[in-house]
Image: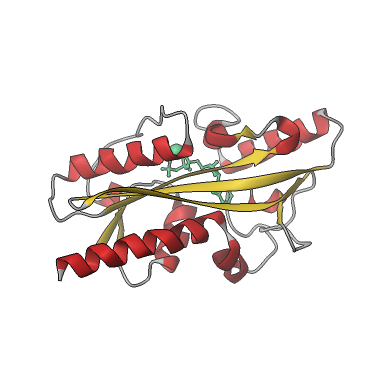
Amino acid sequence: MQLVLATSNKGKIREIAQLCDSFEVVAFNDLVDLGEIVEDGDTFAANAMIKARTVYDALNDPDAIVLSDDSGISVEALDNAPGIYSARYAGKGATDKDNLNKLVEALKAKGLTESPAFYTAAISIVCREGEYTVHGWMHGKVIDTPRGDGGFGYDPMFIPQGYDQTLGELDGEIKKRISHRSKALGLAKVVLATIRKARH
Ligand SMILES: O=c1nc[nH]c2c1ncn2[C@H]1C[C@H](O)[C@@H](COP(=O)(O)OP(=O)(O)OP(=O)(O)O)O1
Ligand SMILES: [Mg+2]
């Protein structure tokens, strides 16, 4: 069964494809040309649903199953910023490196070397059977000295609870087990199994 991913983020596509390996996963950009989807919701869930609905409507295919992800990092010492603005923390068109460096600077500006932090993932599914949104969280801390180049986004500065290495250093198999995205996808796969059953 095909699963259309309503994301342009290569790190997410890689992780979702690995975690949803019983589906034929395809990125929406390979099917339709929508340009940048405007994420003007005020929560992760709202933005995830915007992305999934936009792609579902553009595909105009009653059999389509679209899955989106809106996610980000919230830092306690920064009143849970950047949150839903994680992708553009360093401004429109910011790279992962720009955003990470801005977060390091924000910690230093507070005279901090670390702070508790957590990732949120909201995953939405839109198909003819209905619209669904599930969440996953991963708690830990951010540090001001990024280490490792694994993962993507803010991973080199995030140390998950129970570990002493960053997600940039840890084996990707660990992130697959504990991340906000894998937890949310664990719930999303229950929805997908129900859809698959209803269609056969
Ligand atoms: O596991 C993660 N490890 C590190 N960083 C992460 C992770 N998960 C989300 N993030 C960061 C990256 C980006 O700065 C923002 C997502 O923003 P978000 O709008 O959901 O994604 P995006 O714009 O990169 O692609 P898209 O909207 O097409 O899904 O949070
Ligand atoms: Mg985005």
Residue located farthest toward the right when viewing the structure as drawn = 111
Q: At 58% across and 35% down in the image, what residue appears?
A: 83
Q: Using the rendered image of the protein, determine whether residue 146 is visible from the camera's viewpoint.
A: yes
Name the foreground residue: 18 vs 52: 52
Name the foreground residue: 104 vs 136: 136
- Residue 123 locus on image (x, y percent): 41, 49
Q: Relative to residue 45, is residue 40 depicted above or below?
A: above
- Residue 9 locus on image (x, y percent): 44, 48
Q: Is 145 on the left-hand or right-hand side of 39? A: right
Q: Relative to residue 12, is residue 93 depicted above or below?
A: above
- Residue 197 locus on image (x, y percent): 22, 69
Q: At 82% across and 33% down in the image, what residue appears?
A: 108
Q: Is 116 on the left-hand or right-hand side of 92? A: right
- Residue 106 locus on image (x, y percent): 74, 31
Q: Quadrant of the C terminus?
A: bottom left
Q: Quadrant of the N terminus?
A: bottom left
Q: Relative to residue 22, is residue 108 depicted above or below?
A: above
Q: Using the rendered image of the protein, determine whether residue 1 is visible from the camera's viewpoint.
A: no
